[in-house]
Amino acid sequence: MDVERKVVEADDDGRVRTGTVWTATTHAITAVIGSGVLALPWSVAQMGWVLGPVALVGCAYITYFTAVLLSDCYRTPDPVHGKRNRTYMDVVRSCLGPRDVVVCGLAQYAILWGTMVGYTITTATSIMAVARTDCRHHRGHDAACASSGTVYMVAFGVVEVVLSQFPSLEKLTIISVVAAVMSCTYSFVGLFLSAAKLASNHGARGSLLGVKIAAGVSASTKTWHSLQALGNVAFAYTYSMLLIEIQDTVKAPPSENVTMKRASFYGISVTTIFYVSLGCIGYAAFGNAAPGNVLTGFDEPFWLVDVANIAVVVHLVGAYQVYAQPIFACYEKWLGSRWPDSAFFHHEYAVRLPGCAVRFTMCKLVLRTAFVAATTVVSLMLPFFNAVLGLLGAIAFWPLTVYFPVTMYIAQAKVAPGSRKWVALQALNVGALLVSLLAAVGSVADMVQRLGHVTIFQTQL
């Protein structure tokens, strides 16, 4: 009976899928909510009460709209009965061809590596926040409790070097579970503390246009920060890269694209409500002085602030490998095929540990260590939380969230060039490109401006 049941439930490719709209919704929420949420009050502060909420809702709508288009490309050439594509790259290959796969790959690996840099910076920021909060709790809130994040970044890099030697770490279910729990923990603590601060202020702060041009804030700084804030918001809604993988877990009937569209709507709706709440309540609590990382704006209750910051660290220790392992696999596969007889790439060594044995090649030991070390050095050179998030959002938003889903849908649905639908989709494409370019310019300009006022390899809160 069990064999018969499995045969009945197996899909057309032989796999048994059990995902529903609710599991897909959970995955979607987990995929979207991450460390980018911590920058939302600062982002709203740069744009003000008029443009801030509009940017949050606008990015959410664009993310949902393009998710709907991408859902129809999971199967090709027919969205219901066509061949399955199990990854984002497979969809690009099926709809657009090999040349676009190269471009997509470059964009994906750039955002993967950039996120590793961002996670290194964020982890150091959170550990520094724990140290400062505990210092001020014991020595008084006016105490000078400055600390350098350099040591914390190096320590984080060492931990990731060790974890990078374990194979397929990104596929462990426990990492996804821990990521979901930790991201919810620090996000809700940030929202709770912001709401408590707002209540203690007896009134909302902020202005219609956000941070004002005044002493210490030049017109150029205001412009760069406003553009950078757009990138921060875009980064917070990063979702499209994981949509196809989520859709590949969904059972049919109903058809996978129908289920995924509902899951995207529910997931992005919940995320948007939370983002708008945290962004706006955080801005109302801090006003134009909102910190780049909202958790660094609180000292009490110190234990709750510590819990939130430690949750960030625990989340990012595992999440780092989720982004790193695909890069490792890519270059190791290419190098292994290039030198098939080299012991450096193929001979396995084994080290027995209590309860398990770790197998590795010299290629894995040397190159992964070098890659993580190089990533840590770059993070030490560019320790700018908001600017890095803004640049990551700019890199990911247009190509991965808008351009490829729109272009693949046009090819899949055979939308006639010059038709009203085609013009509308291309207008969205051009508009998203402009937003990405502006956000990238703002982020890079802010980095350049900051580099003139910081000591290299000295990370401060």
Image: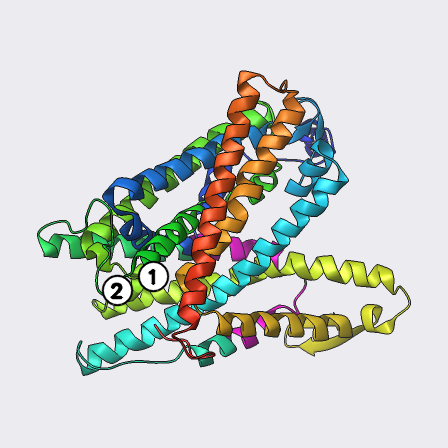
The residue sitting at the left extreme is 202
Is the residue 116 above or below the residue 20 in the image? below
Give the alpha-carbon distance from disc 2 to disc 1, as whole Å: 7 Å
Front-most of 235 and 333? 235
Which residue is located at x 30 percent, y 41 percent? 51
Image position of 106 (left or right of 144) = right
Can residue 168 be seen here? The reply is: no
Q: Secondary structure at mark 2?
A: helix
| Magenta portion: prevailing SS class | helix
Q: Please check the rendered image and state whether residue 345 is part of the magenta-colored stretch, yes or no.
A: no
Q: Please check the rendered image and state whether residue 170 is part of the magenta-colored stretch, yes or no.
A: yes
The amino acid marked with disc number 1 is Asn
Front-most of 363 and 104? 104
The amino acid marked with disc number 2 is Gly
Residue 439 spot, x, y in % from top left = 45, 50
Quarter of the figure that contains the C terminus: bottom left
**Local crowd size for mark 1, using a 10 Å CA cut-off: few (<14), some (14–19), many (≥20):** many
The residue sitting at the front extreme is 219
Q: Which mark is residue 84?
A: none
> What segment carries the magenta color?
156-180
Quarter of the figure that contains the N terminus: top right
Mark 1 — residue?
293
Which residue is located at x 24 percent, y 65 percent? 298
Is the residue 332 above or below the residue 417 in the image? below
Residue 394 spot, x, y in % from top left = 49, 49
Which residue is located at x 33 percent, y 71 percent? 129
Can residue 355 be seen here? The reply is: yes
Is the residue 44 above or below the residue 321 in the image? above
For the residues labelled 2 and 1, say whether their Cβ atoms are less than 8 Å apart. Answer: yes
